[in-house]
Image (spheres, coloured by chain):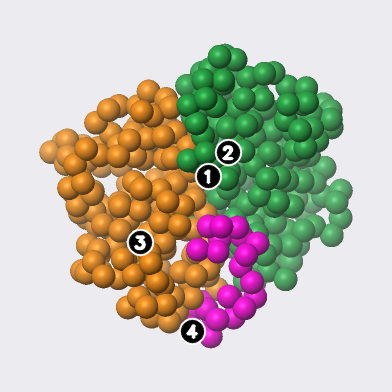
Chain colours: A orange, B green
């Protein structure tokens, strides 16, 4: 049971974003900019960064949510699975492998990112902005993972929830759903 | 030297907020809401949460910045120092001690917050919202610490910098400085 009273039909982060809507807004905005804004990294690649961090932090809700989002965006289920278990074997570019390693180091501690990690990423073609965004996305998902688990939020009763959520994250991103989407709100809370 | 090119006169987080101004905006907004918005926790108490998390993550820039801010807001230097070394001996309320312990657990992993930690905080008078905000502030400062250290940002050349920064955080909070504050911008970047 969550440590604070949250709406029962809103698992994971969704109940928290509803609990305090004013702080939810900049959290949504930052996520939308980083994961859906203009970038030389694809939306699927950015969801993989969210996935590797959430998985490393053992946050079940966030790992399931961003694995499902990555699966839908990439059109396969192998990539996210391998990113979680063995980055070097994942079917992503060498640049992405280097960035995913940086994200995983940041997750543990920012101090673990060495010049060698950065040189490797740059040698594989990563730009300064891609490195910046990788570090900030990793930091943001540490916030999410700690928020979701620190308040002991619930998992959805039905794992099919994450497929509906993934479609929403693909089609609508991280913004609050506008009015008129009540059918979707009922399935996956706004 | 930072892992990406940042303006040399902007140490720590300040260079990062300038490097990507669009993502800086929601980060500033969230911080302003949590640390300076209406709350039953004082601004000094909320800076102590930022301090205990930054110190636990060994982020030198953030620890110095929020220690200085707490010192200015609380009017003493003993409280923040004890919060960093021995929470139980710090001259803060029993409620704050319980909340600071929760923040430190969240810093390590959200999963380390137990029902006993929550019951203790509630027994000392903490509200659900105070517990929520403590967890979210702890998550936010993990983001900051990982962002600042993950990109290996510089410390200021002069430690007096943090006193100027603390006055700014007391008087202006975390919002971007409006036009007309150029004298302050020269001392502590906007």
Q: Which of marks 1 and 3 is in front?
A: 1
User: Callout 3: residue from which chain?
Assistant: A
* Magenta segment: A104-127
Q: Which residue is drawn at 75% across and 38% down?
A: B84
Is A125 covered by the magenta stretch? yes
Q: Is the same chain shared between marks 2 and 1?
A: yes
Asked whether residue A14 appears in the rendered view, the answer is no
Magenta stretch: dominant SS? helix
Chain to which mark 1 belongs: B
Discs 2, 4: same chain? no
Q: Do the residues labelled 3 and 4 touch (CB within 8 Å)?
A: no
- Disc marking residue B109: 1
Q: Is residue B170 above or below residue A32?
A: above
Which residue was labeled with disc 3? Answer: A47
Give me the residue at 65% from left, 54% from top: B13
Residue occupied by mark 2 = B105
Q: Position of residue A151 (x, y in %)?
A: 44, 33
Identify the residue under disc 4: A124
Q: Quadrant of the C terminus of chain A?
A: top left
Viewer can see residue A31: yes
Q: Which of marks 3 and 2 is in front?
A: 2
Residues at badges 2 and 4 in contact (C-beta under 8 Å)? no
Viewer-side label of 1, 4? 1
Secondary-structure class at tag 2: helix
Q: Do labels 3 and 4 share a chain?
A: yes
């Amino acid at each position: 049971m969550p440590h604070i009273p949250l709406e029962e039909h809103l698992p994971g982060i969704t109940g928290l974003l509803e609990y305090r809507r004013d702080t939810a807004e900049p959290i949504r905005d930052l996520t939308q900019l980083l994961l859906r804004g203009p970038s030389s990294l694809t939306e699927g690649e950015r969801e993989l960064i969210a996935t590797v961090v959430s998985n490393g932090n053992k946050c079940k809700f966030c790992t399931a949510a961003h694995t499902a989002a990555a699966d839908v965006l990439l059109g396969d289920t192998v990539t996210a699975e391998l990113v979680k278990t063995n980055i070097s074997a994942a079917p992503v570019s060498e640049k992405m492998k280097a960035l995913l390693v940086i994200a995983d180091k940041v997750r543990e501690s920012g101090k673990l990112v060495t010049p060698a990690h950065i040189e490797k990423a740059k040698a594989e073609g990563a730009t300064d902005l891609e490195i910046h965004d990788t570090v900030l996305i990793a930091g943001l998902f540490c916030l999410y993972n700690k928020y979701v688990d620190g308040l002991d939020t619930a998992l959805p009763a039905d794992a099919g929830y994450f497929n509906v959520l993934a479609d929403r994250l693909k089609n609508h991103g991280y913004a609050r759903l506008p009015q008129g989407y009540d059918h979707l709100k009922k399935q996956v809370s706004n």
